[in-house]
Amino acid sequence: MGNESIAGIQAVRTKRNVKQFLASYGFYIIFILVFMIYSLRAPSFLTVTNIMNMLHTTVPLMVIACGIGMVIICGEIDLSVGSVAFLSNSIGTVLMVKAGVPIPLAFIVVVLTGVVLGAINGFFVVVFRVSSLIVTLGMLISFRGVALQITNSQVIGLPEALRAFGNFRIASFYIDIAFGLIIILLLHTLHTKRPYGRFVTATGNDREIAEKLGIPIRKIKFSVFVISGALAAVGGFFSMTQVGAINPLLGNGAEFTGIAAVIIGGISLFGGEGKLFPGVFFGVFLLTVIETGLNQMSVSPYVYPFFRGGIIFIAMYADSLKVRLRK
Amino acid sequence: MSESYLKMKGISKHFFGTYVLKNVDLKVGEGEVLALMGANGAGKSTLMNILGGVLEPNEGSITIGGASRTFRSVSDSEKAGIGFIHQELALCPTMTVAENMFINRFPVKGGVIDRRVIREQAKTVLDTLGCKIDVLEIVRNLSAGDKQLVEIARALLTNAKILIFDEPTSSLALEEKSRFFDIIRALQKEQKVIIYITHFLDEIFSICDQVQVLRNGETSGDGILKDYNHHDIVSMMVGDLDIRKEKKISKAADKVLKVDQLSRTGVLDSISFELHRGEILGLWGLMGSGRTEVLRAISGLDPIDAGHISVNFNGSMQKVHPKRVKKWAGMVTENRREDGLFLPLSVASNISSANLMTLLSKNRFTVQKQKEEQAARNQVEALNIKISNLDQTAGTLSGGNQQKVILARWLSKAPPIFFMDEPTRGVDVGAKNEIHNIIKNLSGRGFSLLVVSSEIEEMMELCHRYLVIHSGRIVKELPGEAAKKDLMIWASGAGSEAGSEAGSEAPGNVNLGTEGEAEREK
Amino acid sequence: MFQQAPCIICLKPADRVKDVYLHISIKKSEGTWNMLDQTQNEDRNSSTTQLMLTFFKSVSNSPLFIFGVIAVVLSITVPNFLSVRNIVNLLTQSSTIGLMALGMTFVLILGGLDLSIPANMAFSGILGALYMRDIGSPVIAALIMVAVGTAVGCINGFAVAKLKMIPFIVTLSMQAILIGSSIWITKNDSVYNLPDAFGDTILFRMGIVPLPVLVLFVITIITHIVLKLSFFGRWIYYVGINKNAAGVSGIPAETVTFFGYLLSGFFSGLAAIIVTARLNSASASMGSENIVLDIVSSAVVGGVSIYGGVGTALGAVIGVIFITVITNTMNLLHVPYYLTLVIKGLVIISVVGFDSLRSIRRS
């Protein structure tokens, strides 16, 4: 009976290991499969131009997802990113177009607005101790309301110089890909190589232990919302310049795709775990690849949200499975 | 030996008028290992929390290296060179070993954390501990023993001179233990001042020089360890009086619960026992011995890997799934605020929560308020729960009354079996007595109880029979008349050396007077 | 890529205040507050004075009290507020949000969150509408709506209760899936040309009261009774307050959680029937995420805690009426629609903030 039970336990363990492996690396496998299928079915898929185009499309969401990633690693959530992106860029655009403010100054205003909006989120979370889910859900709607007011719900075209910047490329390399990569790598460095980033991870691990170790958790929490706000503003800026105008749908649904990308990239919603690079980069890219591929296979764009929802559902299940298997 | 490096003098501490420490002195010199012993609630933790800056004493002074010190916070104490290795480790599981060691003092070079330095320093410190953990390993993947080493290494990094170990071996495997002792000896050679808190008697004799025993907040004995044997220490811990009342339970009473070969990998190992009608069976063991886990496993709160449970169903024993045992058993958990009470709800609805289905009106859907209140009122009166009215919320009650509310919940359901984990934790003396009476009364009325408590006096007061548990195994069954010393010795792991299933567990040779007695019982 | 997402399109204010009941006359224009207060009174069978005391205590203790005062002031100062047409309109608007808020109340008391309610409403509405338009019987169409809504709720419940996934993520992805499917099925167009019988039946007026208002009224009372008086309701509170303790007490916590989400889906299906009837069409835009904010803020303003274990069905519905009053007043005052979004967002945060500050001070 002893042997039997040992064999049983071992069987259970092997099963667990397989599950654990799938939960951790399943998305990389899906990624490779998807990539292969598309390459075989659409000949234009596996070309430098197409890959560069996909990276280009990825940039705005990648920047925004980095901010969400930091917040989630810290054990909180930010649903307001899309609206922060819209509001800060609305202000910037109106200043540029209506008041003739020079572009660099307007860009600074955009980022600063993002910082302030992030700080508002952080303030409610840290000082009033309202759950970040509710705060940022409220702000998701409020900020968008203000922005719609500012832009009068209209599409406003950008100055020529900015429009050129958004789609500027050398050969097939879009310049904003470089900016996007720089930003994600800088944040990755901040997260993994600076004491601050380690404090963020520690806070997300366990608030009480972090406090015991003398980490100023309130300041850390506040700051991740500020970072997320600033990055949302910058991401929105890239998105706007790519389109060449600001439109009322800017950033709509970014919180959802952002969270999806972050979770697919292996950052746990339970906090304290995961990396921005390659995690978030990979997550965002996978989503783009899937949608580009669907597009090239002439699937109706109305189906995309369905796929996206399905993928995040699976990603989330994998995440909770990982946590449960560990116990 | 000249002046001791660490001296605590006349330390007193009281909470709400009850003294936890009364005029306690403690001194340890460089290169010495002091064993701080005492039963639960003797004041060891309070004393060490004062030294660690967690608590401030009401009276008394601390002198370190000849200079007088006062600690207002943990960081004050750290600055004075004190490293406190808590029983519950403060590690971030998703971060690496090196990061955990440097979490609050990262060296920065060129704007980023100097990974080379932390890697090397971490490695150096771990090497001095003779430990081969990869410093880049994620802490979650380490064994319990390795985690502890990381924590020790972190304390050493701060150049702590005084090291406090609180129950360091409770989660360690055998070989980890002996490696840990080597480390203690190495630290001793480096002239560190070490305070070692433990329940395990055999351990202190293999590594400690000095001993100090606390009992009820006072020093009941101290000095050089060699001058004492196991018996002396146990006597100092438990006192001499052995209040043993005659408690008889008819052997013929029928079984109500039978647990067979219950196992949970890494936690419980082949637990088997029987519980009889009207019996109070004590599950006696130290913290971390698996005593709580047994209760949780047999009441279906934790999963099990092997074994089965039978209950008496209309006169015959029938196997039941652990999840269904709840139908026959009431569970009083050790942590009433976290998994016992519904704090914001009224006393009445707390009491009725386990028993809602019998309080329905004729439509079988709505809860009948009068029935519920009547049932609650009966219990409140029977158990003398002090409340202003039944709508008072459970969160506003005192600990004793809260505990009684939980008992009331199960009494109103009246299942044949009760599981009680620390039924009187955090309860004042008066309420404690009342709860003891409730338990005895239950037993007298034919209910069967399985009781866990960390207070030996409580166990001796209540139990008809003991199962001693150590490292997830039942190592001994003792009769209700068993002496306090026997209980202590078996639970501390020393007894298994004396018993015939010898050898596997406790290192170091233990010679006890109870040896013969134990063998005779075998 | 995200900005082109054909995801969620805001309902225009004109849609939301669409006035379907132009010709209804109300004899007595008694405030809704009175009406609902009485229902709360009827639930308890103790003496009147004690009852009024308890009621006053519970009301003055909650933000509701302040908001009630604001609402009264608004109703007096704002022109056209007390017109019969406006009040009927207001109540009818409340009926759909109210049903969804009742569903949300179950989930919130359980300590969860269901962000998929409006999307579920849109999705089940569309399926039912398609059936009606292409195949037949409005009765079966209505059943389809409820069945689809409930089925979606079951999936949410299974994921949260059995798979132990985080509620807001489960329901957020469910929302995306449902909106995606809705747009897909309808090609982002409205499903119209519904049989007249459907709208006529659902919008039938009983004397002064339109059927949806009556439905909300009856269902609110039933829900209130279920939550406050039945064993199932008790279990919901127990689980929401302390899941571990509930488990120890032998309460089937997983099953209770499952049913909470199931009911939330069920109520979404009911709401779908009314919304489809009112608009006489169904489209993906019915499931705008702004409605989630309306639902959550109504419930929270009505005293339902987002941390679980606290709140009543009656409170939630009063919250709905309050939020509708605010929206309505701002419409009448010609406050831009977008500004109403800001105000609502701030209301919910300040209510929750007020609540958590109070609990911090207490402990």
Image (cartoon, coloured by chain):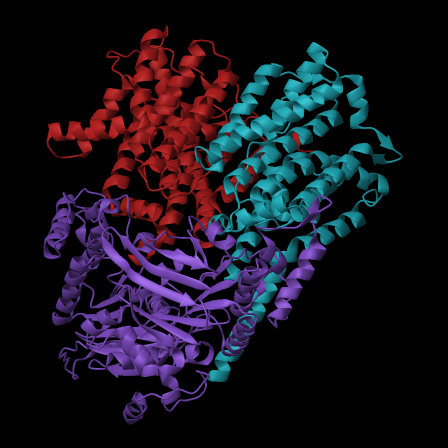
Residue A50 location, x and y as percent?
A: 81, 40
Total number of numbered discs in the rendering: 0
Q: Which chain is red?
A: C
Q: Quadrant of residue C5?
A: top right
- At which x and y percent is residue C68? 30, 20
Give the quadrant of residue A183: top right
Q: Is residue B195 visible?
A: yes
Residue B515 at what x, y percent from top left?
A: 32, 90
Most foreground residue, A240 or C143: A240
Quadrant for the C terminus of chain B, please.
bottom left
> Which residue is the extreme one toward the top?
C79
At a point 73% along the width and 39% down the height, the residue shown is A292
* Chain A image colour: cyan
Left-right relation of C246 to C130: left
User: Between B123 and A220, which is closer to the camera in this rendering?
Assistant: B123
Vertical relation: B248 (above or below) C176: below
Side of A96 relative to B95 (left or right) = right
Residue B343 locus on image (x, y percent) = 28, 47
Q: Is residue B433 left or right of residue B101?
A: left
Q: Nearer the viewer, residue C241 or B372?
A: C241
Q: Is residue C5 visible?
A: no
Between C18 and B461, the residue placed more toward the observer is B461
Q: Residue at x 69, y 61 (%)?
A: B120
The chain letter corresponding to purple is B
Residue at the outermost right position: A171
